[in-house]
Image (cartoon, rainbow, N blue to C red):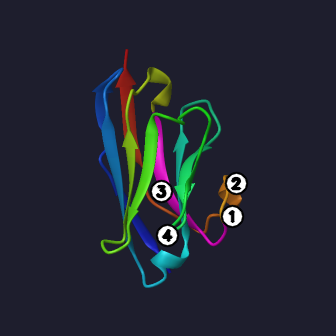
């Protein structure tokens, strides 16, 4: 069992930055592939970034070069550093845990409650 709690969302102007955090509890956290998703009004939920405990990360094309996902395994926390934010990044952002790597939300067993990110133009 893994519990996930996101924080760090807010309102920012276009071009600004935010860092989201996701605190995980549960002994098996380190064995999961951790991902960030977002869900904007009128759109489908989409994969943003993900990574295993070690190794390289995966990113959606829309955020490559602007967002960075990282993990602090000692703190059981994952982060999403978001730079050069655009109005189209506005969404509720969720962290999630999956036993397999990938962008399909159906493979993720555990989800946080979400945190709102709003980017004004």
Q: Earlier in the sequence, mark 2 or mark 4?
A: 4
Mark 1–mark 4 distance (CA, rounded to whole Å): 17 Å
- Residue 115 screen position, x and y as percent: 38, 47
Q: Earlier in the sequence, mark 1 or mark 4?
A: 4
Residue at image position (42%, 81%) is 26
Residue at image position (70%, 54%) is 104
Residue receiving disc 2: 104
- Element carrying mark 2: loop
Residue receiving disc 3: 95
The answer to whether 99 is drawn above or below residue 11 in the figure is: below
Mark 1–mark 3 distance (CA, rounded to whole Å): 13 Å
Q: Earlier in the sequence, mark 3 or mark 2?
A: 3
Mark 2–mark 4 distance (CA, rounded to whole Å): 19 Å
- Element carrying mark 1: helix
Mark 3, Cα crowd under 10 Å, few <14 / some 14-19 / many 20+, is many
Give yes or no for contact between labels 2 and 4 (Cβ–Cβ under 8 Å).
Answer: no
- Residue range (magenta): 91-100
- Label disc, if present, on residue 107 of the rendered structure: 1
From the viewer's side, name the closer residue of 60 and 43: 60
Mark 1, Cα crowd under 10 Å, few <14 / some 14-19 / many 20+, is some
- Residue 94 screen position, x and y as percent: 48, 51
Side (left or right) of 8 relative to 28: left
Q: Earlier in the sequence, mark 4 or mark 3?
A: 4
Dividing the picture into quarters, in which one does residue 43 lie? top right
């Amino acid at each position: 069992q893994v519990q996930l709690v996101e924080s760090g969302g807010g309102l920012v102007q276009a071009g600004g930055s935010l860092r989201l955090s996701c605190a995980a509890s549960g002994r098996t956290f380190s064995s999961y592939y951790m991902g960030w998703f977002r869900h904007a009004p009128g759109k489908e939920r989409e994969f943003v970034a993900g990574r295993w405990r070690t190794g390289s990360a995966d990113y959606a094309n829309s955020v490559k070069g602007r967002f960075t996902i990282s993990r602090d395994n000692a703190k059981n926390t994952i982060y999403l550093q978001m730079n050069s934010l655009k109005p189209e990044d506005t969404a509720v952002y969720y962290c999630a845990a999956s036993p397999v790597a990938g962008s399909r939300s159906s493979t993720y067993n555990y989800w946080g409650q979400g945190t709102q990110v709003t980017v004004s133009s």
